[in-house]
Image (cartoon, rainbow, N blue to C red):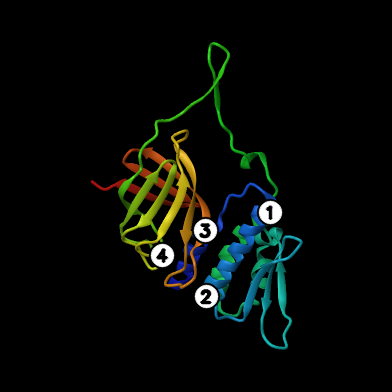
Amino acid sequence: MSSWATICTMFVMFYIFVVCSGHAQTQDQTAQSLRFVNELCLSGKQYNLHADTKGNLVIKKLIPGSHSSVTINKREAEGAKAIYDKKLKIIDDYQARECTKTYIGEALKFVKKEPSKADTPNIKQKSSKAGTTNIRKSKRIDLSGLWMASGYICRAVEPEEKVRIQHRENVVTAIKEKGDACIRSGEVTFTGKYDGTTTTIPVEMQMRRPNASTYPLRVSASLEIVDSDSLVLVYSDIKITFERYK
C-alpha cells in the first residue's frame, strides 16, 4: 500500500466510528461521515459515495452520459470479499479506491443502527445500610491549565502539542496553543462537561483534513480523567494522552 493510502486509512479510521444513541442522530452522523470520505478520498475524482434508503452504500460514477453505480451492503463488506472487491473496482484510481475501501465497512456498522441497551448510560448505584440509594461521586479535579498532548494524527502522528484547557464551572474547553495542519493554533480541539460525578466524560472533538479551509467536523469521543495531571482522549482506536505542563 502506498504512503498516501496509509495516510487515508489512518484518517478514515480516526473519523468514522461515532457512538450514537438514536436513529435520527445516527442518520446525521452517517451523512456527515460520508461527506467527509467524499472530501478525503474522492475529492477531485468523478465519483460520489452516499447511502440509500435501504441502508446500503452506493458509489456512483459522475461521468457525463454515464449512469454507472454499484451498491454495497453489510454482508458483502463483512464476508463476500470477492464481490466486495469487484464492486469497488468502479473506482479506477487505486489510491482513492484503497482509501474508500477502508471506510465502507466501518460506515455500514452504524447505518440504520437502532438504539440498544449498550447505548443507554448505566449509572451504578450503591445501596446504603439504611436502604437509601447513593450515586458514587468522584472528586472534582480542576482541569484548567497548560497540557502537553501526544498522539494527535494529521498527515501522520504529530510531535507533542501544547493544549490549554479552560475549566469554567462544569464546561471544559481545550484550545491548541501549538497546533498542526488539521486543527491549528488557537482553535478548539475538544469540548465537554465535567462536574466530578464520573472519571470519564463524553466530549465533542473537532477534526479537519490537512490545510482545509472548511469548518472542522465535530465527532463524539470520550475523555478519561486519570488523575489531576493525566488525561486520555479516546476516539475509535486512537488514544491521545495529556500530561499537565509544569
Query: Mark 3 or mark 4: which comes first in sequence?
Result: 4
Q: Is residue 17 above or below residue 209?
A: above
The residues tagged by marks 4 and 2 sit, at their Cα atoms, a distance apart of 18 Å
Mark 4: amino acid? Cys
Res 28 quadrant in image? bottom right
Pick whichever of labels 4 and 2 is earlier in the sequence. 2
Residue for badge 2: 95
Q: Look at 53% across and 11% down and name the residue there.
A: 129
Residue tagged 4: 154
Which residue does the numbered mark 3 point to in the structure image?
218
- 41 left or right of 210 in image: right
Query: Do the numbered discs 1 and 4 sit on residues whose CB atoms are within 8 Å?
Result: no
Front residue of 56/186: it is 186
Which amino acid type is shown beneath numbered disc 3? Arg
Left/right of residue 129 with respect to residue 245 in the rendered view: right
Task: Tell me if residue 220 comes above or below residue 85 in the rendering.
Answer: above
Image disc number at residue 24:
1
The reply to whether discs 1 and 3 touch (Cβ–Cβ < 8 Å) is no
Q: Which residue lies furthest to the front in this view?
A: 169
Q: Position of residue 16 (x, y in %)?
A: 55, 59
* x, y percent for residue 87: 68, 72
- SS type, badge 3: strand
Q: How crowded is mark 3: few (under 14 residues within 10 Å), some or many (20 or more)?
A: some
